[in-house]
Image: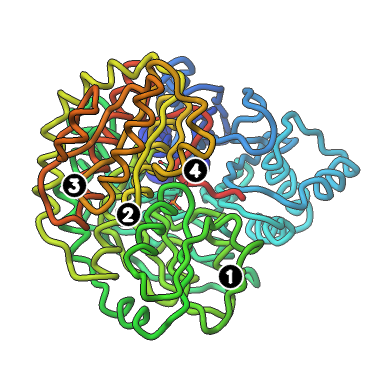
Amino acid sequence: MCGIIGYIGSNVASQILTEGLKRLEYRGYDSVGIAVLDNSSLEIRKDIGMVDEVSTALQFTNVNGHIGLGHTRWATHGSVCRENSHPHFDSSKKIVAAHNGVIENFSKLRDDLLSKGHKFVSDTDSELIPHLIEEHAKDSNLLKAFIKSVLEIQGSYAIVALSSADSEERLFLARKNSPLIIGVGQGEMFCASDISAMLKHTKTFVPLEEGDIAILTKTGYKVYSVDGSEVQRKQITVDWNEDIAQKGGYSHFMLKEIHDQKHFINESLATDVTEAKKLIGEYEKIHVLGCGTSYHAGLILAHLLPDKNIHAFIASDYPFVAKPDEKTLIIAISQSGETADILQALRFAKNSSKIAITNTVESTITRICDITVYLNSGPEIGVAATKTFTSQLAVIFKLAREKPVGLSAIIEKMIEKENEIKAIAAKLAGSEHAFFLARGLNVPIANEGSLKFKEITYIHSEAYPGGELKHGTLSLITDGTPIIALAPKDETVIKLLGNIKEAKARGGLIISLTNDDNVKEESDFVIGLPDIEVSLYPFALIVPLQLLAYHVSVLRGINPDRPRNLAKSVTVE
Ligand code: F6R
């Protein structure tokens, strides 16, 4: 939630910040802003809207200066308005800061500052950060003032700050429960919430650890622990090409990422699962944790290990419904590795061994868990998870069974049906509701298809095991209600056929994903499935569901990469 970026060097900071913010926009897109220091003049430009829109209107790139910071917001504290957008000034307008996270002791800190004469212009918790620094700088040097301020904050934060009153040009950084990564350049330094925002400039990174404080100068960086002592942090090098973080000729990142699945699936299958597999073999009781799409992958994992005492949990609810102990193995699935709900669930399961399945190198989840299995899907920019879900499935199959074969070809075959799917999308674009039906192993895929559909089309949709329809939902099926049936020729198809007939008898418009002739006969539209090994149908089913959601979204005039109210990395509970 929220993207944050900083630059110090010899190039025009405003250009680098604006480009980087475009890469970070998937993290939040309510408002955007930059602050740049030019000699002693510190200027903020910010407003509500998307990066392209605001940066053009306010001419971000006309701001001179070689040091600055930027922010793209997903509102948590205070409405979406210019005043609440970041960066924020202190009272003297000499200190600026941008913040990602939530300050839990906000009221107390703000009251203290108000009593000392500070005036606030926004409703955000973040605005108090430059004021806190200002207050502490009255009797400390800036680094000490920054550290004292950070120590007072309870909650989560990634902070970038700078001061025009600083004796040298420096950016001040801090992180706790929100990602912040340093990018190491030649005579210039960067920081951002995510590697992809810096990929154009460097491939060398230093992920900050929980509680770290850092300063960046043109020529280097120093990392400090909260007691002010300097600490060393690991440098990593990534071999990602900047093209991965570009649309590459596709109209949206989501479409590119759906198409990319046929390549990345092989990278994911190459991931090393040896240690994780061994650990799974040692435990009988397994809790799988995830949120949203990652939870759906977790449901599949639970299906694939029927001989274990295994259960998939929605991470945000985990502390209320489970009692993990030292005999419980936790498998935590999170593409970002930064989702607050899953991190709190992992901290709750303090006595259990933990495996992380994530796409994000050095993310917080990798530090909490004993073993990490990487998805190797490359950066996913579209807010809706697509290629990382398929990668999660591939890794899960490899963990629970043998390495599956032929996945790339299956995915490619389904992508070839894009034009047919687009034609079906046109029939659904005016709908108000849609229902996704499946049985058995295919139910989590129906859940995922339905989530994808509702989040980017804004059409209400629900997914059910087919048998549940007659227990209530059937009353919602009237003439033309879309029913998307996941009906591959496996052990579920006969029973699902019955459910399809029930829906059809009530006027349902049947769109089936099937290779079964009887289902085809009952269907208004068919997306054909190949005849494949039955356990691999989830891979064939998910691709057309992603494409269907994508094309309905575009037909409804929505930007599928940036659905309203959402953000890619959900770092608040
Ligand atoms: C939906 C989607 C979300 C995420 C969820 C968890 O398309 O992307 O439901 O799956 O927010 O995110 P991660 O996997 O990063 O923990």
**Quadrant assignment, res 149:** bottom right
Q: Which residue is mark 1?
A: 225
Label 3 or label 1, whichever comes before in sequence order: 1
**CA neighbours of label 3 inside 10 A, class few (<14), some (14 to 19), many (20+):** many
- Dot 4 falls on a residue whose secondary structure is strand
Instruction: Determine whether, in the image, residue 348 is placed left or right of residue 405.
Output: right
Q: Which residue is mark 4?
A: 4
- Seen at 22% across and 22% down, the residue is 422
Label 4 or label 1, whichever comes before in sequence order: 4
Q: Position of residue 543 (x, y in %)?
A: 23, 40
Q: Marks 2 and 4: CB-CB under 8 Å?
A: no
**CA neighbours of label 1 inside 10 A, class few (<14), some (14 to 19), many (20+):** some
Mark 4 vs ligand 1: CB below 8 Å = no
Front in this rendered view, residue 30 or 564: 564
Label 2 or label 4, whichever comes before in sequence order: 4
Label 4 or label 3, whichever comes before in sequence order: 4
> Mark 2 or 4, which is nearer the eye?
2
Separation (CA) of disc 3 from disc 2 = 13 Å
Front in this rendered view, residue 125 or 304: 304
**Quadrant assignment, res 178:** bottom right
The colour scheme used to paint the residues is: rainbow
Label 3 or label 2, whichever comes before in sequence order: 2
Instruction: Tell me which amino acid carries mark 4.
Output: Ile
> Mark 4 or 1, which is nearer the eye?
4
Q: Which residue is mark 3?
A: 489
